[in-house]
Each structure stands twice: as structure tokens, then as C-alpha cells.
Amino acid sequence: MGQNQIKLSGYSFSASNPVVGKILASEKLPNVKLSSKSETLFTLGKDNTIQVKKSALQTPADFLELVLVSENGKTDTFHIVKDEFVSNRVIAHRGAWKNTGATENSIAALQHAIKMGCTGSEFDIHMSSDSVLFVHHDHDMNGVHLEKTPAAELAKLKLANGESLPTLEAHLLEGLKQNKTKLILEIKPSSISKERGQALAQKVVEMVQKHKAQGWVDYISFDYDILKKVLELDPYARVAYLEGNKTPAELAKDGFFGLDYNQGHLQKNPHWIEEAHQLGLTVNVWTVNDPKVMDWLLERNVDFITTNEPELLLEKVKK
């Protein structure tokens, strides 16, 4: 499973914004053209800007397929998502599980987050000893260490709701059935080594690219180097840092999409919210379950709030 040879600066379109983005310049790929089928859906400008044709803007499909052909005859295929993602600032932490009867980080929790209309559903990724990606928060489950156990054994584990421990692949495939809720993918730092964390980042990006999910996925992590690896592999990926020990200026300098800090960090440094916005960064805050803290953050116009109480926050943002 290889990476895309061609890189794009964007993977979505809307009726009001038909511009998808640009093909990133590369000495190895000086000339790229649209496939014959893609020519009916897109235009490719001399400056390598891809735009959806007017006739394709009203497609009922969740995405359009874009096939680009390089001069060596190789093709890369992308799914350009029709941007109908809701914009209510509510991100369900580990999916919507607390008040739904689902298990956190389960496929059911993702489905509930989508059904209730959250702008995003967050989930956590670890890598098995034989490099298969699984969705779970902690490094171990029922005493089984995920990073030190082969995938065949992890596949036998059951969540409290009866689901098998989900793979990243299964989680992506479920999320790609719709275009209303973003998939907020947290890459967990390795408990074994920094090198393994880098390998995990590579595997995650490859899996996202395999399923052409770039337009649906935002990446977050506590490991700064993991996020820098993601950007190395996909320069326009949307990445946000969780640890809280970097200023907005530092994040902007390294090409990050946003900051995603604990509520305590932003209560101590409320000026970071305005600074981040001035630098073009998004501001997400975790994990906020207190109604008063929600109100404080909403008053300061943060972009997203990650919560175990999405139902409560949804009611607040509707007012």
C-alpha cells in the first residue's frame, strides 16, 4: 500500500466554492493531467488549480472521483468530498457514547455522533505488534497491551457493547458513508519508542490515503513529531496539537491547522484564542463537560469544543 505520488492542497468543494485546490509542485511530476473521465467533472488550470465544473456542483453524491495522470503514465485517484459538514463546533469525544448506551471509541459511538449532527467525532489509534491499526484509547485493553500483541489476538477482543475491537480501516469505512461529520483521528504516542510513533504516523496516513479519506480526516496528537511526520507525508493535512506547550505562533510556523488544548491551558492563556485566530489557526478545546466552561469558551468564539456531553453542547449552540 503506497502513498499518493501526487499531493493536493485541498480535497473538498461546495456550490459556493468550486475550487478544490492545487496540485503540489514536484520535480518528479512536472506534468499532470486529468483523466478523460475526470475532464467531465473538473478543470485543471495552467497554475495546477483544480476546480469542479458548474455542471457537477449539484451532484447528489457525497464525493466526486478525481483521477490525475502523470507523464510517466501513473495515476492517482482522490475522492473530493462535497462539503456539507455541519459547523456547530461540537466534537464528540471518543464518539457519542456516554448518553447513548454505546461504548466509547466504538463504531456505534461514531454512528451516534453522526446521527445527532456533531461537526466531528474523535477517536484514538494504536498499532499492533504486527503493524495493524486499532481504535482504542488506552495502551491496553483488559490487561492486553495493544502495541505488544498481534492483530489476530486483538481481533478477538470485545468491547462492552459486544463489538469487536474496531480497526482504523473499519472506522474509516463507516465514516466515509456520509459527509456531515468529520473524523477527528488522534494518533496515540507509542509507549515503546519514538521510532514506533513515526511508523504509526506513516501507517495512519497510508490508510487514510488508501481509502481516499483526506477530505474527511483531521489529525491530532500529543506527540509533536508524529504530527510533523503527518505533514511530511501530506503537506496540507489538517493537524492540531494536543499537549498545550506550544504557542500559536510556534504552531503556525510549523504549518499546523490548529491547536487543540485542554480547557485549563486556555483558561490560563485566554489570549491564545485571539492570537490563534489572527494566525489563521483553529481553536479546539478538550474535554469540556461543565456547562459553565462551555459558555465561557463559546463567548470567546472558539472553533470547536470536544466533549463527552455532545447533547448538552448541541443545545447550547442552537440558542
Image (cartoon, rainbow, N blue to C red):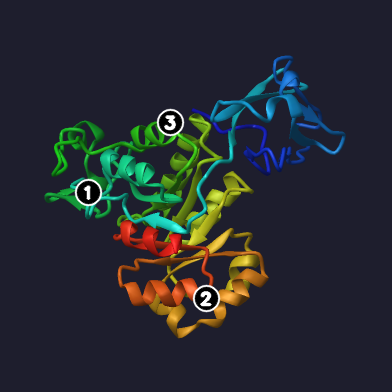
Q: Quadrant of residue 135?
A: top left
**Residue hosting label 2:** 300
- Callout 1 touching callout 3 (CB < 8 Å): no
Residue named by callout 1:
100
Kindly identify the residue that appears in the image at 56 percent across and 52 percent down: 238
- What residue is rendered at 58% in x and 51% in y? 231
Disc assigned to residue 244: none
Circles 3 and 2: CB distance less than 8 Å?
no
Q: Nearer the viewer, residue 20 or 292?
A: 292
> 106 or 128: which is nearer to us?
106
Of the image marks 3 and 2, the number of the one nearer the N terminus: 3
Write down the residue under mark 3. Answer: 177
Question: Which residue is nearer to you in this view: 188 or 100?
Answer: 100
Q: Is residue 251 left or right of residue 195?
A: right
Give how far across and how far down residue 201 sits, in percent: 46, 47
Q: What amino acid type is highlighted by mark number 1?
A: Thr
Q: Position of residue 304 (x, y in %)?
A: 47, 62
Callout 2 amino acid = Arg
Say which residue appears at 52% left-offset and 34% top-offset: 209
| Of marks 3 and 2, the one in the foreground | 2
Q: Is residue 318 left or right of 212 when viewed as pictured?
A: left
Sequence-wise, the earlier of marks 1 and 2 is: 1
Q: Residue at x 73, y 24 (%)?
A: 55
Q: Amino acid at mark 3?
A: Lys
- Can the viewer see residue 185? no
